[in-house]
Amino acid sequence: MVEPVLLWRRLVGAQVRSQLQYRTSFLLDLFGSFLISFIDFLAVLVIFHNVPQLGVWSVREVALLYALSSISFALTDLLIGHLDQFPQKIRDGNFDILLVRPRGSLFQVVASDFQLRRLGKAMQGVLVLVYALAALHLHWTVGRVAMLVVMIPAGVVIFASVWVIGACLAFWTTDGGEFTNAFTYGGNFMAQYPIDVYASWLRRFLCYLVPLGFVCYFPALYLLGKHDPLGLPRFLQFASPVVAVIAAAVAGTIWRGAVRHYRSAGG
Amino acid sequence: MIEVEHLTKEFVVRRGRLRRERHVVEAVRDISFHVERGELLGYLGPNGAGKSTTIKMLTGILVPSGGRVTVAGLDPSKRRVELAKRIGAMFGQRVQLWWDLPLIDSFELLRHIYRVPADRYRTSLQRFRTVLDLDPFLHTPVRQLSLGQRIRGELTAAMLHEPELLFLDEPTIGLDVVAKQRVRDFLVEINRERGVTVLLTTHDLGDIERLCERLLVIDRGSLIWDGRIGELKERYGRDRLLIVDLERPVPPLEVAGAVVERVDGPRQWLRFRGPAADLTARVAAATRLVDLQIAEPDIEEIVRRIYAGER
Ligand SMILES: Nc1ncnc2c1ncn2[C@@H]1O[C@H](COP(=O)(O)OP(=O)(O)OP(=O)(O)O)[C@@H](O)[C@H]1O
Ligand SMILES: [Mg+2]
């Protein structure tokens, strides 16, 4: 269990070191994505100040949801965001190289093409979180702190699973990129807002099929001590880690099946 | 070491922008062969014959459409990870080294990917540094290496974990004479000294002639030759060429027992089989000879004949 993590660190570390060689361009990139995040943050503030209420959710509560989802998403993006270049690897046949090495192919894809500058994107979520926590005056219990600590990695795993499943499309079609993006970036957008504001078919889709409700909505209900406006069972509020494990298992299985359809490229 | 039984690979390709017709390409069609431990085997065939596709099935990259493959006792596509520890692979057209890192860093990463113990890594790297003369560019980023330098790096990368079996897809592509020789020497060394089984594809017949005892030839997906190079020469190379210089240009000669293959001014190439003396006499009787020489077909000529579908 530990050894793959060490190897991941080594592989990613080597890439980060080589990216840091071009220090100026790296810092500019980082600053650029930070700046975009900050403008995003200002835009969110403007919206929150003009919309007093979203269903039963106060603006501050929505801000918390938004922040937590953004952080999970930005971390996912940092860890596996390079997956959106994966279709290119499939098309030009460079995935071959990974398959002749004695490691899981998904692991190797995730550990290659790491881009540290994506870290800048996480800033926006952190800023909104600071704003939301300052405005909400939550009463911090051990349970709530634990929930906050657990829900972020669980959210990352759920997002990542959706991305991986989307990336599997590349094994069949060479132009599924946009479709996949609808799930990944669109998924983030969906998870940022309370799911009870969506139409019921969409809500069901988000709860059970693409389990984005477990990234934020259910854990946030617990954090805020709110009654579920949908009246769903209370255990769902604690189910995120389990859902994350199931999602990861499903994604792993689909990936393994998909790799068998890899066609490589002539050469 | 390698057992291939009725191996087939089909690709479904879609053609046309709008109607997208399905079209099946049979890249490899019902081929069978066995390779013993310690062999150094050449795999030859014209462009698009199916060489790379075969290697990809042997290494577990592609799942066969039909037939059976066993490599080192394992089914490559089902036991890919296990197999990968025991084989090395190098594809001349792909880069497996880390593009932005110094060469030595790639080796270091591969050592961890393959879980090679530190002391074994040191001795084996030391050996490659000497044999392939890596020292001058060991600390240069891969993207700054010349092709020949990079290929030497790639070979090292494929061999660092000391595999029993090595697959090389066009390892000498684009190399100059000196670099080619170095790679060939290296392959002979690992095969003779270390008993590594090597299967290599190439379009360079020099590689085949210097390195391989046994040759597989594939054409349009089907295996058309499997045997020793000597036998191949005997089978396809019995014909020799009589090259005659005549006094002046004449139409292709018509003599019994030979066919004119080429005419260039007063010089003509006659392909024949059997003793040369009779034929020479017949030619001399037919026209005025200035000079003549007899050429044995070289491997290049033989392969040209095989590709042309002659028997
Ligand atoms: N990924 C793929 N999708 C569709 N067709 C393919 C694919 N890979 C190979 N082919 C087809 O299969 C056939 C065999 O290709 P392959 O790459 O094995 O040839 P090769 O013997 O390696 O040729 P070369 O000497 O040019 O490298 C060709 O007709 C090629 O067009
Ligand atoms: Mg090829």
Image (tube, coloured by chain):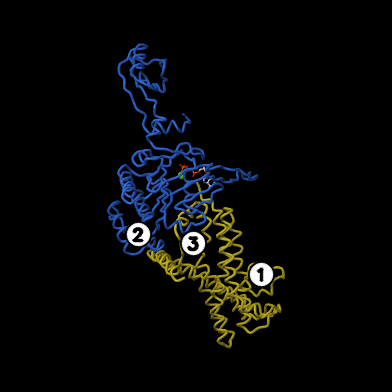
Chain colours: A yellow, B blue
Badge 3, how many Cα within 10 Å: few under 14, some, many 20+? some
Badge 1, how many Cα within 10 Å: few under 14, some, many 20+? few
- Same chain for mark 3 and mark 2? The answer is no
Q: CA distance from mark 1 to mark 2?
A: 47 Å
Query: Where is residue A170 drawn, in percent x and y?
Result: 56, 56
Query: Where is residue A119 drawn, in percent x and y?
Result: 48, 70
Judging from the image, what secondary structure is the residue with disc 3 in? Answer: loop
Q: Nearer the viewer, residue A125 or A147?
A: A147
Q: Toward which corner of the image does residue B39 lie, by quadrant?
A: top left
- Image side of residue A56 versus residue A88, left or right: right
Three-letter residue code for mark 3? Gly
Callout 3: chain: A
Q: Toward which corner of the image does residue A256 lie, by quadrant?
A: bottom right
Does ligand 1 reach within 8 Å of label 1's beta carbon? no
Callout 2: chain: B
Q: CA distance from mark 3 to mark 1?
A: 28 Å
Judging from the image, what secondary structure is the residue with disc 2 in? Answer: loop
Given this view, does label 1 or label 2 mark the residue nearer the observer?
1
Return the residue at label 2. B102
From this viewpoint, which residue is outermost toward the top? B285
Return the residue at label 1. A208
- Same chain for mark 1 and mark 2? The answer is no
Query: Where is residue B155 drawn, in percent x and y?
Result: 36, 52
Three-letter residue code for mark 1? Tyr
Q: Residue at x 49, y 37 (%)?
A: B219
Query: Which of the two labelled residues, at mark 3 and mark 1, occupies the earlier sequence position?
Result: 3
Return the residue at label 3. A104
Judging from the image, what secondary structure is the residue with disc 1 in? Answer: helix
